[in-house]
């Protein structure tokens, strides 16, 4: 059984897969995860690359809204479970090495994520002072972090 810290790292790793899938960080995260799972076996590494490509395709094919959210949650859970299983099977010294590699991939995915984007869906919205009446579509992006 994994300790709480390792479960958190596995969860972050699963999230990094989904987060990186639509960014420029994809190739780095994809390759890094394939190496982690492959553990020096070129055949296993290739199989992981194919799984990761399949994940990206599933995410890209998902429609917006609730379906996209459901697909993202399922993919995070899938990769978290796989990472937990891998970490559980490794000796402690290798666990620590894989944790460090995963943390670097998570940081890479986070760095490539759009800064401060908030998306709210409304239809036929009317905005009065600070109130939203009705519904419409609005996306707010904070670019202050990019200056």
Image: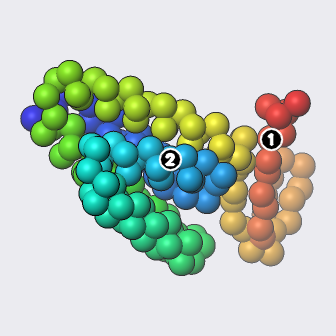
* Residue 61 in which image quadrant: bottom right
Quadrant for the C terminus in the image: top right
Residue at 26%, 36% in the rendered image: 7
- Report the mark closest to the observer, 1 or 2: 2
> What secondary structure is found at the residue carrying circle 1?
loop
Q: Marks 1 and 2, how far apart in space?
A: 25 Å
Q: Is residue 71 above or below residue 12?
A: below
Given residues 115 and 84, the one toward you in this image is 84
Q: How many marks?
A: 2
Disc 2, SS? helix
> Which numbered marker is on residue 19?
none
User: Image check: 96 left or right of 89?
Assistant: right
Which quarter of the figure is the N terminus placed in? top left
Residue bearing mark 2: 29
In the picture shown, does residue 103 fall above or below 56? above
Residue 142: numbered disc: 1
The reply to whether residue 77 is in sight is: no
Callout 2: 10 Å neighbours few (<14), some, many (20+)? many
Q: Residue at x 61, y 48 (%)?
A: 25
Q: Using the rendered view, name the quadrant where residue 40 is placed.
A: top left
Within 10 Å of disc 1 (Cα), the crowding (few <14, some 14-19, many 20+) is few
Residue 99 at what x, y percent from top left? 33, 29
In the picture as drawn, the residue positioned furthest to the left comes out as 1
């Amino acid at each position: 059984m994994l300790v709480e810290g390792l479960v958190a790292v596995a969860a972050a790793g699963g999230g990094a897969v989904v987060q990186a899938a639509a960014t420029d960080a994809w190739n780095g995260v994809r390759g890094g995860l394939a190496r982690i799972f492959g553990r020096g076996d070129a055949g296993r590494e290739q199989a992981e690359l194919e799984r990761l490509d399949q994940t990206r395709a599933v995410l890209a094919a998902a429609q917006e809204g609730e379906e996209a959210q459901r697909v993202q949650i399922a993919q995070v859970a899938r990769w978290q479970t796989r990472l937990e299983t891998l970490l559980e099977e490794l000796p402690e010294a290798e666990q620590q090495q894989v944790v460090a590699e995963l943390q670097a991939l998570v940081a890479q995915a986070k760095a490539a994520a759009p800064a401060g984007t908030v998306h709210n869906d409304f239809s036929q919205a009317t905005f009065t002072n600070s109130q939203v009446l009705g519904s419409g579509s609005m996306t707010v992006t904070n670019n202050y972090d990019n200056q």
